[in-house]
Amino acid sequence: MIAAAIVLVVLVTLLIGARGVAAIRSTSDFLVASRRISPTLNAAAVSGEYLSAASFLGVAGLVLKDGIGALWYGVGFTAGYIAMLALVAAPMRRTGALTVPDFAEARLGSAGLRKLSAVVVLVIATLYLVPQFKAAGLVLTVVTGTPYWVGVVVAGAAVSITLALGGMRAATYVQAFQFGLKLLLFIIPAIWLVSHVGADTRRDALAPVEFTRFDRAAPVEFRLDVELTITEPTPVSISGGAAEVLRPGRYEAVAGSTWTFPAGAAVPKVDGALPPGGDRWSRPLLDPNDSGYPLLSTLSLLMATVLGAMGLPHIIVRFHTSSDGRGARRTAAITVALLSVFYLFPAVYGVLGAVLLPELYLAGGTDTVVVALPARVDSGWAGSLFTAMLSAGAFAAFLATSLGLLLALSGAVSHDLLPGATVRRLRLTTLGAAVLVVALALPAAHLDVGALVTSAFAVAASTFCPLLVLGIWWARLTARGAVVGMVVGLVSSAGVIGASFFLATPPGLAATLLGQPALWSVPLAFLTMVLVSLRGRPPAWATAAMLRLHLDETERSRQRR
């Protein structure tokens, strides 16, 4: 049933995408659907590609792993569109650009800035795409038992073929359809879970006790190498072997092994992880590294998600598909309403997981809590049905988001880095980029989906957000200021985050500032752009460019007459 649901989603994606084939005659058709998408359809498509693996699976998983404070992710993801509506949507559409690098060159007249912007698009799109394909492989493994690589390859093939066939128009139809599908497949199982678990579980979910002892015999399948600290003699069966009493001390659980703990056994401690339940878990602030600075961590997350939304290249290009600036504003406004409905429900899965599947935090498998809950609640046909629904919805989330990201990546390579883009080159680039991202996702099974996506937001907030906000609202911005500011923002966000993946992060305040650098990297990028620009002269056409950005299209038409 589960495999059939996923196959059906993939087939429908390909069939809907095939509708766009006949309409592709130019690069404008491929990249922005000839700017003929209505606000309602566009908003549904934006919502479809924005509700990624990090939203469908990651937010609930982060609630289980990091506590109630993880709900700030949904707040930031949605609030970013309010900022986009106020500052970016309509002016960006009025530029007539096809991509963000297009806007950079048109506004400041620098081919070098355009190429730098294209490189930043590649960084953001890769950081965002890899976790989508990784989550596809993970979900397929959990619900069907297939090898991890199968889900990665299937997702990559479905996305690249759909996009190569129909470009932005195909992506729009698919993403709008998949938004409605995801909304239904996320909300209906949530309502069923809440009604089916019983009054006692609902009460416990509102105030879960700290997970200190197993309430039943619990097999824990470790997805990562995890170092456990056992605090009292505990009989444990490892990978189906005979139970062995482990004395207090530190033990390494190897990825792929299954440890079965008996009912009543003390839960091992995991360094840097917060057991579900209890006062710290219920605190409405986020402190994922247990650094002791929850307010700073929460503010940094909000800065990354709210301002990062304004700089995501696959979202920005959506406003270029509107017919005019007014349509772009309406698209952003409708999107806020649609996202607000969706983000009411990740908390349901997160708090129920804290009561019913708290052992997932030991195994590094919190990303799977959404698809694991139905079978835990009901082992019969109902559990299988809702698992199939959620698995299909999760796969739709991977595909919808990956379509937009792969299109942005292909456009950056074919349209911005290489001269003379053609439809044929765009299609070939799409297929080649998908192969590369699949190759990167295959060894990434141990990476945290939420952490990678948040990293992409931090990079977008530190690079494109300053470029767009200052480029749209400050006439004194210079090409030199934009280049230096973007380099500083890129190094201070992507560089620091990349280093934290390979080097041990110092504890305390450093863990907060280096693990989520948006709190200081965004102001640093803004300040650098302003100070460097003040030492130079803006382009001679800066005033005319500002008028074009802010003068309503109907007003311009009236002045021409």
Image (spheres, grey):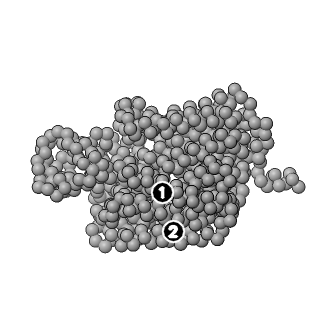
Residue at coordinates 65% horizontally, 29% vertically from top-left? 532
In the picture as drawn, the residue positioned furthest to the right comes out as: 561
Say the numbered circle drawn on residue 435: 1
Say the numbered circle drawn on residue 13: 2
Q: Is residue 209 visible?
A: no
Q: Position of residue 219 (x, y in %)?
A: 22, 56
Q: Secondary structure at mark 2?
A: helix
Q: Amino acid at mark 2?
A: Thr
In the picture as drawn, the residue positioned furthest to the top comes out as: 535
Q: Secondary structure at mark 1?
A: helix
Residue at coordinates 36% horizontally, 73% vertically from top-left? 1
Q: Is residue 382 visible?
A: yes
- Crowding around mark 2 (Cα neighbors within 10 Å: few <14, some 14 to 19, many 20+) is many
Q: Position of residue 465 (x, y in %)?
A: 60, 42
Judged by depth in the image, the label closer to the viewer, 1 or 2, is: 1
The answer to whether 516 appears left or right of 242 in the picture is right
The answer to whether 136 appears left or right of 326 in the picture is left
Seen in the picture, residue 344 relative to 507 is either above or below; the reply is: below
CA–CA distance in space, label 1 to label 2:
19 Å
Q: Position of residue 102 (x, y in %)?
A: 67, 48
Mark 1–mark 2 CB contact (< 8 Å): no
Seen in the picture, residue 139 relative to 235 is either above or below; the reply is: below
Seen in the picture, residue 330 relative to 462 is either above or below; the reply is: below
Residue at coordinates 60% horizontally, 71% vertically from top-left? 19
Q: How many marks?
A: 2
Closest to the observer, 419 or 298: 419
The quarter in which the C terminus is drawn is bottom right
Closest to the observer, 265 or 24: 24
Residue at coordinates 62% horizontally, 64% vertically from top-left? 169
Say the numbered circle drawn on residue 118: none
Q: Amino acid at mark 1?
A: Val
The mark that comes first in sequence, 1 or 2, is 2
